[in-house]
Image (cartoon, rainbow, N blue to C red):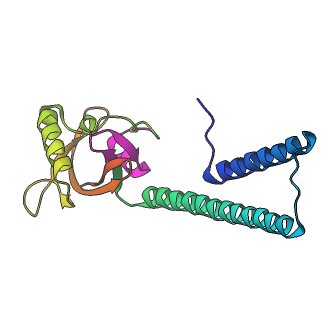
């Protein structure tokens, strides 16, 4: 797998490459005797230009590092929110693939840490209802809106544990559009 670089690393590497190319060209011109006759004003102007360029690259690098730190902190806050929620939370994509499940959801469905990731959401639906659930999920992905699953004010659904046993659950859905597509957050409570 190719190595990936952060934005600030790419910016630093790019600026170092530009500086190396410029120094190489200056040295090559000098060695070939093609150095231009430069006046002090031109040298001062070029020097100030390089200093300004260096300051801009340095400032952009600092800003990118700050953004990367903020993004990392935000990810940690998101994980902490999911992990400390009193209900089960499962995040899936619009195709029904589970992306993330908190510890409460794993416990509720009888799965170990990380076992729900990459599973189809239909694995948590009783076998007799899986086909119907898949078509309902596709319909939801076509017109996503925050809602409670089931019918009526006392809506409850059957859910399936890893061992095949079932329980009655209250499930609410919340869609979220991201650069990676539609993500669906399900909040689940065992109400048996």
Residue at 39% over, 43% down: 99
Q: Quadrant of the N terminus?
A: top right
Q: Using the rendered view, name the quadrant where residue 95 is placed.
A: top left
Position above or below: 71 against 6: below
Residue at 13% over, 33% down: 131
Q: Nearer the viewer, residue 120 or 35?
A: 35
Position above or below: 91 against 48: above
Which span of residues is magenta-colored?
91-113
Q: Position of residue 94 (x, y in %)?
A: 27, 44
Residue at 22% over, 54% down: 171
Q: Position of residue 48 (x, y in %)?
A: 80, 68
Q: Nearer the viewer, residue 103 or 185?
A: 185
Report whether 43 appears left or right of 56: right
- The answer to whether residue 175 shows anywhere in this view is yes
Position above or below: 140 against 118: below
Q: Position of residue 18 (x, y in %)?
A: 73, 48
Judged from this view, the residue extending furthest toward the left is 152
Q: Nearer the viewer, residue 64 or 152?
A: 64
- The answer to whether residue 192 shows anywhere in this view is no
Report whether 38 appears left or right of 102: right
């Amino acid at each position: 797998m190719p190595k990936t670089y952060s934005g600030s690393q790419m910016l630093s590497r790019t600026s170092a490459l530009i500086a190396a190319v410029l120094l190489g060209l200056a040295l090559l011109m000098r060695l070939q005797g093609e150095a231009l006759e430069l006046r002090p004003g031109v040298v001062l102007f070029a020097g100030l230009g390089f200093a300004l360029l260096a300051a801009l690259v340095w400032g952009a690098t600092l800003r990118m590092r700050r953004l990367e730190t903020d993004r990392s902190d935000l990810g940690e806050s998101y994980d902490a929110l999911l992990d400390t929620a009193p209900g089960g939370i499962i995040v899936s994509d619009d195709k029904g693939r589970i992306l993330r499940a908190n510890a409460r959801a794993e416990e509720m469905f009888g799965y170990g840490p990380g076992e729900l990731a990459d599973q189809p959401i239909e694995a948590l639906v009783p076998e007799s209802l899986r086909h119907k659930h898949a078509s309902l999920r596709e319909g939801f992905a076509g017109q996503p809106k925050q809602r409670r699953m089931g019918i009526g004010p006392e809506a409850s659904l059957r859910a399936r544990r890893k061992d095949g046993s079932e329980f009655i659950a209250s499930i609410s859905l919340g869609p979220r559009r991201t650069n990676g597509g539609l993500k669906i957050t399900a909040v689940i409570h065992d109400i048996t």
